[in-house]
Image (cartoon, grey):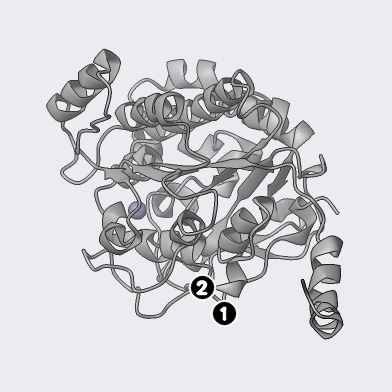
Amino acid sequence: MLSRRRLLQLAPAALAAAAQPPRRTRNLVLLMTDGLRWQEVFSGADPALLDRKAGGVADPASLRRQFWRGSPEDRRAALLPFFWSVVARQGQLFGDRSRRSEARVTNGLNFSYPGYSEAFCGVADPRINANDRLYNPNLNVLEFLHRRPGFEGRVAAFGAWDLFPWILNAPRSGLPVNAGYEPLRLPEKNERLELLNTLKAETEYWDSEAFDSFVFHTALEYLRSARPRVLAVLLGETDEWAHAGRYDLYLKSAHRFDRYARLLWDTLQSMPDYRGSTTLVLATDHGRGSGKKDWRSHGRRIPESQSVWMAFLGPDTPPLGARASTDTVTQAQLAATIAALLGEDFRSAVPAAAPPIAEVLAR
Ligand SMILES: [Zn+2]
């Protein structure tokens, strides 16, 4: 039995715990696509790039039929129908600079490893300054959650890019990180997964990055079979096709990313363990430049490529839609926001991490 004195010592902590609002989010899925610009998210296809010369478009008439509309509102709905019919009505979407909602990375480098590290670790670490195979020294939020009661063995990441085991420090964190062309093996026999493994291995184009379709469907198979509480799915084609100067394939990859977000959401709502208790977070790792040449690229020399976007959809996020006139939100806030949605405090482990985005957490 506790002494009266011990009870008094406990009282403030107990009061603080009582004051913590209960969260309905029990599970969380993070879906990211590499280097998708805020310009396409909020305005759809860019009229300056729907041609052979600037956009490398193979069939401009066909691409225009698919994605060109008279207004930015109609163009974005054509490109990202799930974003604009579901997320923008039931969730929140940050990063429309034309409406004074700014989202940005704070690492100053505006490329992938620093962007993912900032998102997962909650800090912009100046030591993370190259896309190299170096194990990330920082604790990431997936690893943090993996160590929390109730989450052990129920956190996993799937990435198109083969650098994710380094970014998420898989050997140290113990997280399953399936990345690049690596096959996924599950304990029970799964013929769909075996076919996905074969097709992924045999459909090689980029050296260090698999096509999104194989990565996404492998992750979906894992979700159905292993039932993780936290799942990160990290796609890459939007960045690859932009670097290749193929605006048509970039748009089609963005459109497919939106379809994958819908498929994830519908799948989650069809599963009793996940329905009404899962938050979907959508994000990117960096922006890109603008204009007929710089849209292809990003990095320190293109300061505007610091601009990103992010979206939240789930039972704890008030349905404020596409936000306007907000405080700037940063990539570094994603880590603590993800933890907070699950009722966990990432900053208890990483005090330097940026705080959660309060507005996506219901009071
Ligand atoms: Zn890139």
Q: Which residue is mark 1?
A: 352
At 68% from the left and 42% from the top, the residue drawn is 25
- Can you give x and y, in whole percent of width and height, for residue 56 in the image? 34, 34
Q: Residues within 10 Å of mark 1 (few under 14, many from 20)?
A: few
Q: Residues within 10 Å of mark 2 (few under 14, many from 20)?
A: many
Where residue 123 is drawn, which disc sits there?
2
For the N terminus, give its image quadrant. Answer: bottom right
Say whether residue 91 is left or right of residue 5: left
Q: CA distance from mark 1 to mark 2?
A: 7 Å
At 59% from the left and 34% from the top, the residue drawn is 44
- Can you give x and y, in whole percent of width and height, for residue 276 in the image? 71, 30
For the C terminus, give its image quadrant. Answer: bottom right
- Can you give x and y, in whole percent of width and height, for residue 344 in the image? 64, 59
Q: Are marks 1 and 2 in contact (CB under 8 Å)?
A: yes
**Kind of residue at badge 2:** Val
Q: Is residue 254 visible?
A: yes
Say whether residue 347 is left or right of residue 247: right
- Can you give x and y, in whole percent of width and height, for residue 226 in the image? 41, 31
Q: What is the secondary structure assignment of the residue under circle 1?
A: loop
Closer to the camera, 258 or 264?
264
- Which residue appears farthest toward the left when viewing the image? 202
Where residue 248 is drawn, which disc sits there?
none
Q: What is the secondary structure assignment of the residue under circle 2?
A: loop
Residue 116 image-quadrant placement: bottom left
